[in-house]
Image: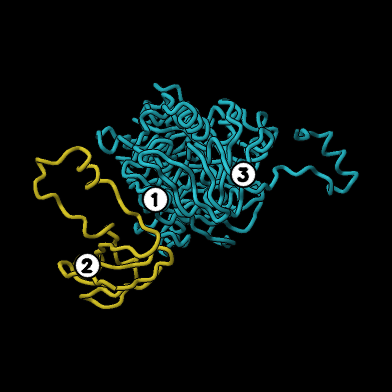
Chain colours: A cyan, B yellow
Amino acid sequence: MKNKYSIISLIKNSFSYHENWQKAWSDPEPKKVYDVIIVGGGGHGLATAYYLAKKHNIKNIAVIEKGWIGGGNTGRNTTIIRSNYLWDASAGLYDHALKIWEKLSQELNYNVMFSQRGVMNLAHNLQDVRDLKRRTHANRLNGIDAVYLNPEQVKKFCPIINTSSDIRYPVLGGTLQRRAGTARHDAVAWGYARGADEMGVDIIQNCEVKGIKRNGDSVEGVETTKGFIKTKKIGVVAAGHSSVIANMAGLKLPLESKPLQALVSEPVKPIIDTVVMSNAVHAYVSQSDKGELVIGAGTDDYVSYSQKGSHDIVEGTLNAILELYPIFSRMRMLRQWGGIVDICPDASPIVSKTPIKGLYFNCGWGTGGFKATPGSGDLFAHTIANDEPHKLNAAFNLNRFVSGDLVDEHGAAAVAH
Amino acid sequence: MFLIHCPYCGEREQSEFKAGGEAHIVRPKQPTELSDDQWAEYLFMRKNIKGVQFERWVHTHGCRKWFNMVRDTSNDEIKAIYKMGEKPPTK
């Protein structure tokens, strides 16, 4: 049983100089057999294990992670959470996640620092204006809060934006989702890990999957750097490395893995209290609780697993940032990094069964998976436990690339893809 | 960022080029006879290799010609470049 985190436990532990806190999760060696093995210990994988144990009463679960938990894209994203997607299927999926976010800290007894500071998307040309207005209407029909803002309202909501009409990409309007915002990315992984560990899930770090053993059309287990582990169900949540795992099972996925870059500045006093995204100029910015500007750039167009990206991508993003926010012109950037994102041709995720029995994939989240973490875990757990998708992720099946029933969010989701 | 040796123009910065995805995906000879599965395989399924991969690139801000590249996607090292229509290197 985990000790509850509270103000009382905080005071109590201060007497022992915070040296006697209980371990948040254990570090077990793998058992020989599990009912379900989750490949990938990021937010999505840990959330999947958590909901499998909590809602579907499966306790004999292992999460296998080749590095340390939350050390991949969970710790590399810009932590933006929103659900203002155009299509009904996407709106259902992402708003399901947003509703879980709203209660997640209480549920996990772990502060994920979810902050509903709003996300504003900017329009820079006539087509943007039309697209954003259309999306606002679509969102409201789906019960998702959305308002359209004219340039004066944009300026009022975020005064540091340059709304003059003579800049390269003038601000012609924007949309605002007030329920959207940010959360602390590491805390999401750690909170789910702690919750899953409490219910008996084995979180096995520094253990890389080397092969997937098949018996005809079903899976038998995984070969890992810590030996063979037997199981009948494997849920793969390996983000940029999904194709690598799929190839081990003799499966091909419609994914391309590409570097997506982000950067943070030196910390400064509070200057921007919301998240502003700009699709046309490939730039988005928010401010972390430490005071750093968190800036997201675009993807490179070539396949790479190098966790680096091209300099010109960052340069293009910063050019746009400086034009929109002249006040940042003398800021210095502290760090820049890349994460490898797995992108589907329709820019929507795959949360699905596969033609191989007992093999499930949760991938293709591309440039925007963090926001979906709790919903993705919940729906993937449902899919694994019942061998059938939940109605909210039914549209995100692997077979849509055969049937042609794509969920085409490219350019429609108001995000820099 | 890396440098690419365009077979027509010589060494240039990667930002002058566009990547065109996996190479040597053969266009179906009889499109009307393809099943949905075969269409999906041709249109969407990709090897997405971590390691040595065959790719198409185009020198967008240069000669605008297409060519093939063999590249290690785990560290972005370019192994070979050859023109369209040429046989891929075996080593």
Position above or below: A85 against A187: above
Residue B73: give x, y in percent of width and height: 39, 63
Determine which quarter of the picture holds residue A179: top right
Q: Amino acid at mark 3?
A: Lys
Residue found 55% across the figure and 53% down from its top: A227
Residue found 34% across the figure and 37% down from its top: A355
Closest to the observer: B65 or A217?
A217
Q: Are marks 1 and 2 in one subunit?
A: no
Q: In what element is the residue under mark 2?
A: strand
Left or right of A368: which side holds A271? right
Q: Amino acid at mark 2?
A: Phe
Q: Amino acid at mark 1?
A: Ser
Position above or below: A394 against B11: above
Chain under label 1? A
Q: In what element is the residue under mark 3?
A: loop
Left or right of B40: which side holds A237? right
Residue A8: give x, y in percent of width and height: 84, 33
| Residues at marks 1 and 3, CA–CA distance in whole angstroms | 26 Å
Outermost residue toward the right?
A15
Chain under label 3? A
Q: Of the numbered discs in the image, which one, if any, rests on residue A31? A: 3
Q: In what element is the residue under mark 1?
A: helix
Q: Mark 2 sits on what residue? A: B67
| Residues at marks 2 and 3, CA–CA distance in whole angstroms | 50 Å
Residue A219: give x, y in percent of width and height: 43, 41
Left or right of A404: which side holds A169? right
